[in-house]
Amino acid sequence: MEEKNLKNSTHLPKVISGIDTLYYFFESNSAYADFFTDLLQQLEENKKRFEAQELAYENRDLKVDINTHIFEFNGKAQGFYWFSHFENFFSVGFKDSLINVGVHDIQIQLNAIGIYTLGLKNLLHLTDTIFKNITTGYKPITRADLNIFVQADLSWLHKDMFVSRKRKYITHTKEVSSKYRLQTLYIGKDPFLLRLYDKQEELKNSSKKEMMYQYFKNNGLDTDDEIFNIEFELHRKFMRTYRIDSVEDLLIVAEKLFKECIDAIRLVDLSTISSNSINNSNRYKAQTHPLWEYISDSYHLKEFLSENKPLLKIKRPKYRYTVEQAIQEHIELASRAELNDIIVDEQFYCEVLTARDKVCGSVFRELYSQNKGLVSDSAVGAS
């Protein structure tokens, strides 16, 4: 589907909205310590059985039973013992509650096979059920990818067609293209990243191809046609700025958050501004592209109810460092210096300047010239 057709409502593409990735913690309860001990015992017994028969084994050969569900051992990383659900619906990590006490004991990573076969709502219910005996139910979120599959060829897009409220997002861009067309476009970086890519190209040699094709067909997409994925990778630091702390917090505002992301990194119609504006920093004056408006309006999570309340961003308190504060700090510095027989004079500031770069040096020179007229030599430690 070409750009010109997207401006015609009769050519608007079919889409599927969703959450493509979800990572979170579980808060453990008082039963967790005994559970963790039993878990390690199961692993050790598995190893001894192989060793007793002098059989070679890999991590995945070591299996444990958790609430009647079988898990395969993946190995240990960053203090966590990692396991995969036997149907590979999700991965889970457990750690000793007495080690690294500032981090929750249980990590969950939902896998694509679980999300696209069971559905996100059913998969969350499954993890809640399996671990209900060792958790409080509180699930602090660490990462979520909000995505929308689009039945259209979007290879005509390029990084210069995107503008952002934050300049630093645009400075972190990456395009991956074949000889003839765009395959992947990245804008931004952790904790907020836009990723747009050719899903058909990604699935060519993927073990998930059959599963994803069935998912697309079940939701009305033609697997013989172009399919692109537009997704926003959001990490905890970004979500906390919108008061999103838990999985439940995300689910009730996900639709509004997706629209906020669309507004934060905007696809624009360059034909609505002059060629001169395209080549300078005025691209932000261009109108939002009709495709982007359509994508924003089309994102809906049918599995979850959204709350009809505004998505509020936490405003950072403004802090202004005043001349009066600077003078007070220098008076305190002078007092400490005088007690230790250090002379704070013009030579002292010159020595400071040599340790600073030219930009910061100019600030110190101005600061000294101001203080020189406000604080006497005796007040700054002259004997």
Image: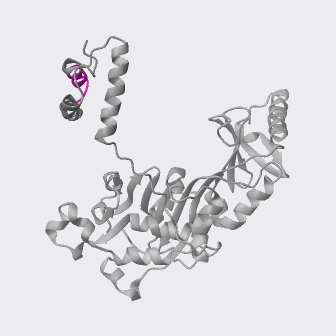
Q: Residue at x 45, y 49 (%)?
A: 190
Q: Can you say whether 214 is above or below 184 in the image?
A: below
Q: Horizontally, is 100 left or right of 173 in the view?
A: right
Q: Position of residue 49 (x, y in %)?
A: 85, 32
**Left or right: where 104 falls relative to 312:** right
Q: Nearer the viewer, residue 67 or 221?
A: 67
- Main secondary structure along the magenta-highlighted residues: helix
> Furthest-bottom residue in view?
10
Write down the quadrant of residue 75 in the picture. top right
Q: Between 138 and 310, which is closer to the camera in this rendering? A: 310
Of all residues, the one furthest to the left in this rendering is 276
Q: Say which of 116 and 61 sits in front.
A: 116
Q: Position of residue 222 (x, y in %)?
A: 51, 77
**What colour-coding does the image apply?**
one colour
Q: Report the quarter where the N terminus lies.
A: bottom left
Query: Can residue 302 be spotted in the picture?
Result: yes
Residue at image coords 34%, 53%: 173
Residue 302, quarter of the rendered image: bottom right
Q: Is residue 56 left or right of residue 215?
A: right
User: Vertically, is 190 above or below 146?
Assistant: above
Residue 211 visible from this viewpoint: no
* Image coordinates for residue 227, horizontal then vertical, percent: 46, 70
Q: Which residues are magenta?
A: 349-357
What count of labels does the image hold?
0
Query: Residue at coordinates 30% horizontally, 59% vertically from top-left?
Result: 179
Quarter of the picture holding the C terminus: top left
Q: Is residue 206 magenta?
A: no
Q: Residue 297: percent from the left, percent from the top?
A: 47, 78
